[in-house]
Amino acid sequence: MTDTTQTERTEARASVLSSALAALPRPALLLAVLIVLLCALVIAFGPVRALQATVNGFVAGSYTGLGAIGLTLVLGVLKLVNFAHGDLLVTGAYFTILFAWLGLPLPLAMLTAMLATAALALATEKIIWQPLRLAKAGSLQLFLSAIGLGLVLRFTVQFFAGSQVRTLGANVVTSIAIGPLRLGTLQALALVVGISAMVIVGLVLRFTSIGKEMRAFADNRALAEVSGIDTQHIINVTWIASGFLAALSGILYATAIGSFNPNFGITLLLSLFAATVLGGIGNPYGALVGGLVIGLSQEWSTLLFNARWKPAVGFALLILMLMFMPQGIFGRAKRRS
Amino acid sequence: MSCKIGRLAAWAAVSALAIVASAQGAGAEPLDLKIGALLESTGPLSELGPPAEKAINLSATVANKAAKDAGVEAKVTIVSADSQGDPQAALSATRTLVDKGASCIMGPSTTPESISVLNGITMQRKITLWPLASSTRLRTVKDDGTIYRPVPADDLQSKALVKAIENHVGKGKAVAIIFRNEPYGDALSKSFTTDWQAEGGTISSTISFDPQQESFDSEAGQAVDTNPDAYVVIDYPETYAKLGAALVRTGKFDAKKVFVADALSFAKVPDNIPPEALEGAYGVAGGSPTGTDAFKAFNKLWDEAGGVANASYTANSFDAAILCFLSAVEAGSTEPGAIRDKIRSVTKDGAPQFTIETLADAVKTAATGKEIDYVGVSGAFRFKDNGDPSSSLYDVFQYQGGKQVKIEQVNVK
Amino acid sequence: MSGQVLTVAGLVAGYVPQVDILNGVAITVAKDEIVTVVGPNGAGKSTLLKALVGLVTPKSGRIALEDKDIAGLAPSTIVRQGLGYVPQRENVFETMPVEENLEIGLKPRRDLPLRLRLEAMYALFPRLRERRRQMAGSLSGGERQMLAMARALMPQPKVLLLDEPTAGLAPRFVDLMFEQVATINRSGVTILMVEQNATRALAMSHRGYVLDLGRNAYEGEGPALARDPKVADLYLGGLHG
């Protein structure tokens, strides 16, 4: 072997090593940091307070994490910063109210609302995104269109449903006792559904044919096209999945929180983006873990500071994390071109 | 030259006419007064909108009848707009009201909204603003004499809370304060802390929260962990729906220990607040002297009109609109600045007193330009220089079976 | 024209209106041939391949794959008709393992058994078998090129289009790559290749075309074209590989 080959080989080995370093230890490192922090909090504030804050952190994190899964799909696969995603959550919750009002039993109304929101997301692709893509719109135009679409959705909901506070009427006060710890029944449900949705989306992406095609499309769109992937089909599926997941999380949020108005989506949107970016764009595990990290850090911070600083702590953490791991927890470093 | 003389003559004629008109008094010129109602119809305080709207509409009915009985040509119309409980929305809603010709603005219910409206439009146009907001901060803003508050400020409410807790829990006990982190919550929690400690009580924890949050479980946990004798909750209905649920979920919470401030005072607990979060809870809200004929007359009017149930501060909204009307009659003008300058002339200590029942006489007297003293449903108005009332009567109520039951009244100074 | 797998006639194409990169290119590729297209930078070599595979929509002209006209179809459809394309850059799915890259490659021909096609590719490129679980983004330049070709070969295309397969490779790998191309061709794959390493590429090709300013300039047998002094002076100067 000549020198050049050796160089190539060394390079290859180095890149294997760096990719292993980049891919593997970040979640592990994060887990270690979280465990150390938890131990410190247990020592400082006693196990009950520290663990209760942890439970609350998981709950708060599952709200954002679940909502971020649909957002990260669109961002990762379609490279679209969908500012209307929060309003898709809202649409899902209000579709539930609509279908319940039309006489469907609540669970059926929820399912119908998810399907309707998925259809709506697909409709936005056909009416807005596809024409914009064909017109070769730049990312700024797409971004502004998403903001506009969000406003249209929000005010349409407001027009028909009013902006007063609504409730889905679920019992939000029951809780499960785990020793001295308390966890709301609906909050536990939100957590379980959030983790299930993450695992299902993750498995679909990992093992199914459509999932592999979505990943290929996200990785390299032109190459996906010339590999015989029907790209429009992938785009449609991504929107349907995103709409469905948005509605699922919107409904769950509305049910578990108890009361909401048409503005809850835009209020939540910033946290959704934070979770998405923190977790690594396009990765459903990342979205949920990103949400959980934000939730945990915010709730833990209430042990140290007045609770009014909670949102500030969450975003300070986001900035810090991005300084040290800009690809997010599960993201991969973008390689040299 | 002749042209100039002609113009002079015309001026003279116009001035003469004006003098004659004013000499004849206000009655000669029909008054068409528009009162703007800035209501929280939607948003976090949407529980407050409907009763306030009904109270202001009632005032128009009463005022129009009084004017007719008095033989004074004056008409009151209410124009209303939604402030959404939001400073920006409140400002644009007020612009709409002013465009529709509103000479006074009733509302809004929060301090940030009031300041936004004041600085954005009303002060510059000398339009009197009648906020139901109770923060002490409104006392110190520059308002050019345009703010008249028909409700007492929170330093008095804090004293009412102290008395209510002393009456129902006892002196010197431990209290946990939970408040939303904005001017209303911040100021009231500070006054309460000072007043409660001055009476020998202790504060077991002070928890403030960001109203934009979705979950309040940690906050709720911290409040119950100190196992206080009482909780003081300073919050709006929309967030208390979430916070209350979180408090109940802790499993260590007893709603009977709760004392809410006036923003959580409603005739009936709203649907979105879990009943367990308020059942048996106490609260305070500015009250009206209940024994008076005016109070009975107002309640009768309210019930006859139908619609939403009576709530806290409806009498204050009603009185505020009546004061605007009487001042306009007194001024013989619907010009906002003229109305502003006559408000103290219709609430003059020592002048002949009138109430809702003798409103026709009040109108007749005011139309002659004489000073009067309108004693409102919510009591007599003695506005201080800063536009705050010295009225200090508070209702202490309890939620029983989801409904507000008034238990007693407390006087605070 | 029996035996012609790919026929291109009067092809006009460009990326933006008014500016045509290709101005009437005509090319034929017969079964089992290696055909190489060379030409100076900007002659439209890469654009030609992109137009064939549908990434650039032709404005006029005819592209026939066997008897089917494929001009103006979507890339995914064209690929399903039997055209395999290896782009010059970004030709692997970097965030996916080697084996998944190959799996994606089989999309146009779901009727073919995955296992068998994978084995065929691993037999052709034993290096890929070693790397099958590794992320494509972590492969060396030569391995990437192998993977890119293997991915395009998965659905057994009628013609394989290679866009500058030796670009950016170390000299030692350039030889390997040309050997690789020859091996693929011997296994029964028709190849249309675009190369800047013109002399070497033409020398191993059955036939060749020289493009200039989007038009056919010369054509002929590969080795003959490589030796043609006119062609060498005009277009192959300095490129003796």
Image (tube, coloured by chain):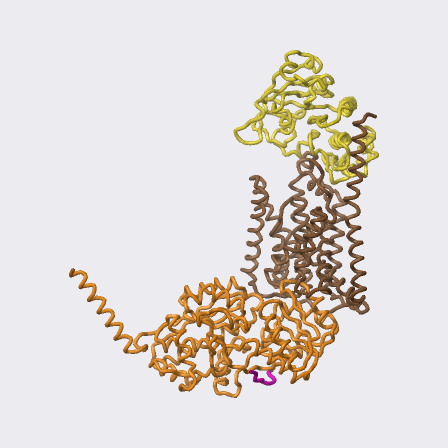
Q: Mostly what secondary structure, the magenta segment?
A: strand
Q: Is residue B31 magenta?
A: no
Q: Position of residue B267 (x, y in %)?
A: 58, 77
Q: Is residue C84 above or below residue A244?
A: above
Count of marks overlaid on the render: 0
Residue extent of the magenta highlight = B406-413
Most extreme residue toward the left, as rendered? B2
The residue depicted at 42 percent of the width and 86 percent of the height is: B350
Among the chains pictured, the one given yellow colouring is: C
Q: Is residue C142 left or right of residue B347?
A: right
Along the line of sight, the residue nearer the viewer: C28 or B405: B405
User: Is residue B17 visible to us here?
Assistant: yes
Along the line of sight, the residue nearer the viewer: C183 or B212: B212
Q: Quadrant of the C terminus of chain C?
A: top right
Q: Position of residue B82 (x, y in %)?
A: 50, 66
What is chain A's hue in the picture? brown
Q: Quadrant of the N terminus of chain C?
A: top right
